[in-house]
């Protein structure tokens, strides 16, 4: 009998189906070969929610077999057939939005408003790629010298390994699954063991929407590196897409090199947030709260370093302290909470170390800075002013509700500091002069810029970074092409 978890029915919308907690292979929920289980905890109180299957190499190979068995038939479907199924996936996610929201908050710890926003964002990838998969039309041209025709068509790259993080358990899964299916690929998804239940729920929704058996497989494991090694050394696997830390991404790239596997990497970030002298202060504060506190600060795009012109520095500092102090910290599933706990104890400890280091080196603690004495993994909204350049939080991702402030006088200085990092995922900039905004945007070393906006993620836009923040792009038509191979045929007629 399949192991399942039943969560409470939402006040609105349909009652949830029991969520399987075993492995999803070949369209069936199956127990792991080991019989072992991995515990899943509620960050709001530290208590165990349930446990999920812990797979081994035998299970991994079975998932590759299932994906391989389904590959030819799925690749042969027409774009319209795939589009109709993806659209049904979107409809079913929206139909179940309320309890998916609850499920994410339960296992991840983000407050209900953030979880609901994530479900909407996650579902939109299915709708976007339902439309986009019909637009990969290929190319036809004449070679200038020979007169031969150059015909280019895009074909599915093959079986893809998708490795997703805990901070966006629904959106990071759909941002990879949707374009892969749109391209005609079959996939093996490995979610984080901190938040596997959302991935299992999405897998069941995909099956209910008509995704054929074997096209999507989901594996959970306590030994992620062993799973990746087994799958990436199978010659049938031709793609890996990973979202997570840069060190893990580097290790995966080395493993993928053995079979010369196409790799997409969405890695770490250290986003600067620049407030120019002529910025609208209230607009910048609104954007700062979005850029910093969306998803509790546990986002690779979260603003990590705030550089504010000296003329606005005090006003911005006072404003951010006021807004951060108004946040209601509490249990993630409490409708009154606007900030939930961090995902686990390790995350809280890391944030505490970064804050303590900054204060020890001379930063001024204006708000928060001390973890709460209560069950669960909580860290309060925290603001630090005059953070020195040698503070660890200037170099490392904070990944939590901590604002790190510095003032500047010269824009060139702010740009230099913004670029003084090995990462280059996101950057934010506020100015009322669009000419200045575009000029600074061109100089910032980041794959994505929020110009007078505190949020930039959109399924229709290319998501990704430069330097050690990753390779490739997700979202938009770029995300679909990542799962395609361009085949060129030369012909004369």
Image (cartoon, helix red, strand yellow):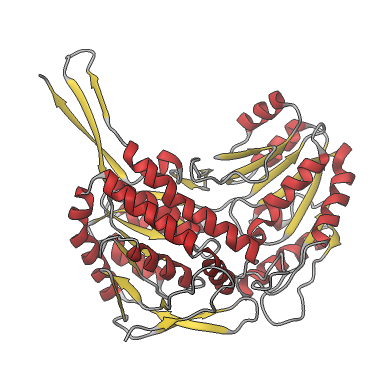
Does residue 447 sit above or below 218 in this rendering?
Answer: above
Q: Is residue 241 visible?
A: no
Q: Count all numbered tags in the image, as a single digit.
A: 0
The residue depicted at 73 percent of the width and 40 percent of the height is 274
Q: Which of 6 and 23 is in front in this view?
A: 6
Tell me where residue 372 appears, x and y as whole percent. 77, 76
Tell me where residue 142 appears, x and y as whole percent. 22, 17
Give the left or right position of residue 317, taking residue 293 as reference: right
Tell me where residue 310 appears, x and y as whole percent. 86, 39
Give the left or right position of residue 410, taking residue 195 as reference: right
Q: Can residue 120 be seen in this view?
A: yes
Could you say which quadrant of the image residue 315 lies in? top right
The residue depicted at 29 percent of the width and 64 percent of the height is 231
Could you say which quadrant of the image residue 255 lies in? bottom left
Q: In which quadrant is the C terminus drawn?
A: top left
Could you say which quadrant of the image residue 420 lies in? top right
Q: Nearer the viewer, residue 201 or 411?
A: 201
Does residue 209 sit above or below 471 in this rendering?
Answer: below
Q: In which quadrant is the N terminus drawn?
A: bottom left
Give the left or right position of residue 147, taking residue 292 as reference: left
Tell me where residue 111 appears, x and y as whole percent. 65, 66
């Amino acid at each position: 009998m399949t192991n399942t978890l039943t969560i409470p029915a939402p006040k609105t919308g349909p009652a949830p189906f029991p969520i399987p907690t075993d492995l999803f292979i070949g369209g069936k929920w199956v127990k792991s070969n080991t019989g072992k289980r991995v515990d899943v905890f509620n960050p709001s109180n530290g208590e165990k929610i349930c446990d999920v299957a812990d797979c081994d190499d035998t299970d991994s190979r079975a998932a590759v077999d299932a994906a391989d068995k389904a590959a030819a038939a799925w690749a042969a479907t027409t774009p319209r057939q795939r589009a109709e199924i993806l659209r049904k996936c979107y409809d079913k996610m929206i139909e179940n939005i309320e309890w998916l929201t609850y499920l994410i908050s339960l296992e991840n710890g983000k407050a209900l408003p953030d979880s609901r926003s994530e479900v909407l964002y996650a579902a939109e990838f299915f709708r976007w790629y339902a439309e986009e998969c019909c637009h990969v039309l290929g190319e036809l041209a004449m070679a200038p010298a020979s007169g031969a025709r150059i015909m280019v068509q895009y074909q599915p790259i093959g079986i893809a390994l998708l490795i997703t993080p805990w901070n966006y358990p629904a959106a990071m899964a759909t941002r990879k699954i949707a374009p892969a299916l749109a391209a005609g690929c079959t996939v093996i998804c490995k979610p984080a063991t901190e938040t596997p239940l959302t991935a299992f729920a999405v897998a069941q929704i995909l099956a209910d929407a008509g995704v054929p058996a074997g096209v999507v497989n989901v594996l959970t494991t306590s030994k992620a590196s062993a799973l990746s090694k087994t799958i990436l050394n199978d010659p049938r696997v031709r793609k890996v897409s990973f979202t997570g830390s840069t060190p893990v991404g580097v290790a995966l790239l080395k493993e993928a090199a053995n079979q010369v596997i196409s790799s997409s990497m969405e890695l770490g970030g250290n986003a600067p947030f620049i407030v120019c002298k002529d910025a609208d202060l209230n607009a910048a504060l609104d954007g700062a709260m979005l850029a910093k506190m969306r998803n509790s600060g546990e986002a690779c795009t979260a603003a990590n370093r705030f550089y504010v012109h000296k003329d606005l520095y005090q006003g911005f500092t006072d404003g951010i302290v006021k807004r951060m102090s108004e946040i209601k910290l509490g249990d993630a599933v409490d409708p009154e909470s606007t900030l939930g706990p961090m995902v686990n104890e390790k995350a809280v400890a890391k944030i505490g170390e970064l804050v303590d280091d900054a204060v020890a080196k001379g930063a001024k603690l204006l708000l928060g800075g001390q973890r709460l004495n209560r069950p669960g993994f909580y860290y309060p909204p925290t603001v630090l002013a005059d953070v020195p350049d040698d503070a660890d939080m200037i170099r490392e991702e904070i990944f939590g509700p901590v604002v790190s402030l510095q003032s500047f006088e010269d824009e060139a200085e702010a740009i230099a500091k913004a670029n003084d990092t090995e990462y280059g995922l996101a950057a934010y900039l506020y100015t009322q002069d669009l000419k200045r905004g575009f000029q600074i945007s061109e100089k910032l070393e980041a794959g994505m810029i929020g110009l007078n906006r505190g949020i930039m993620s959109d399924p229709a836009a290319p998501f990704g970074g430069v330097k050690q923040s990753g390779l490739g792009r997700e979202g938009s038509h770029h995300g679909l092409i990542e799962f395609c191979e361009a085949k060129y045929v030369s012909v004369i007629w």
